[in-house]
Amino acid sequence: MLTTDRADWIDSVARWDGQRIRKVVRRARGAEWRRALSVDGFDVLAGSAEVRVYPPVPVDDWPPELSRLQVGGTELSDPHPPSPVPVGVPQVLLSPHVEMTAGKAMAQAAHAAQLGWRSLRRPARGSWQRAGFPIAVRDADERQWAAALRAGAPVVHDGGFTEVEPGTATALFAPG
């Protein structure tokens, strides 16, 4: 899902995308966040949330500014129900059949978006890119999940490296 201004990442992403996709989610604030900003990446803003994305690297080759970040503290709460998803905006649906921490859910949502990108035809990819890659992440209910599966939505089957069993369906991509 690269835009042309990140063309320098194309080789790294292609190598990453050609294997089992692994994602790492960490939390930073204060001095840790300022150190994390010193590493090449780009920012994604959604309301009051800010996410920094880095080019893929082998887990053992993480920059020192990122390797010290902690997984803990990624549990989030939102006192407001999610807003309706605008017509035409793709969705990532999180499985109603598995409990995940917020960090795990974030990683699975990112993976579902990547699978969604792969599944789209070139014109749909271009339209999504021109729109700025809007996407909505929602907890699916049983009915939504089953309907998306019947429609052939791309599904994330977890590798089992962390908190869920290998092969667990954790998230899927539903085009808008």
Image (tube, rainbow, N blue to C red):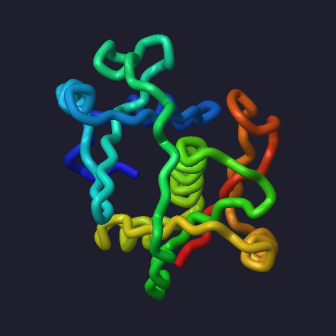
Residue appearing at x 39%, y 24% in the figure: 69
Q: Is residue 59 above or below residue 173?
A: above
The image shows residue 153 at horizontal and vertical percentages of: 69, 66
Numbered label tally: 0
Residue at the extreme front: 79
User: Which quarter of the picture shows residue 18?
Assistant: top right
Residue appearing at x 33%, y 16% in the figure: 63
The image shows residue 175 at horizontal and vertical percentages of: 56, 73
The image shows residue 154 at horizontal and vertical percentages of: 68, 60
Nearer to us in this view, 115 or 40: 40
Residue at the extreme bottom: 87
Position of 51 compared to 166: left or right?
left
Nearer to us in this view, 19 or 33: 33
Q: Is residue 153 above or below residue 22?
A: below
Residue appearing at x 47%, y 64% in the figure: 78
The image shows residue 51 at horizontal and vertical percentages of: 33, 47
Residue appearing at x 63%, y 67% in the figure: 139
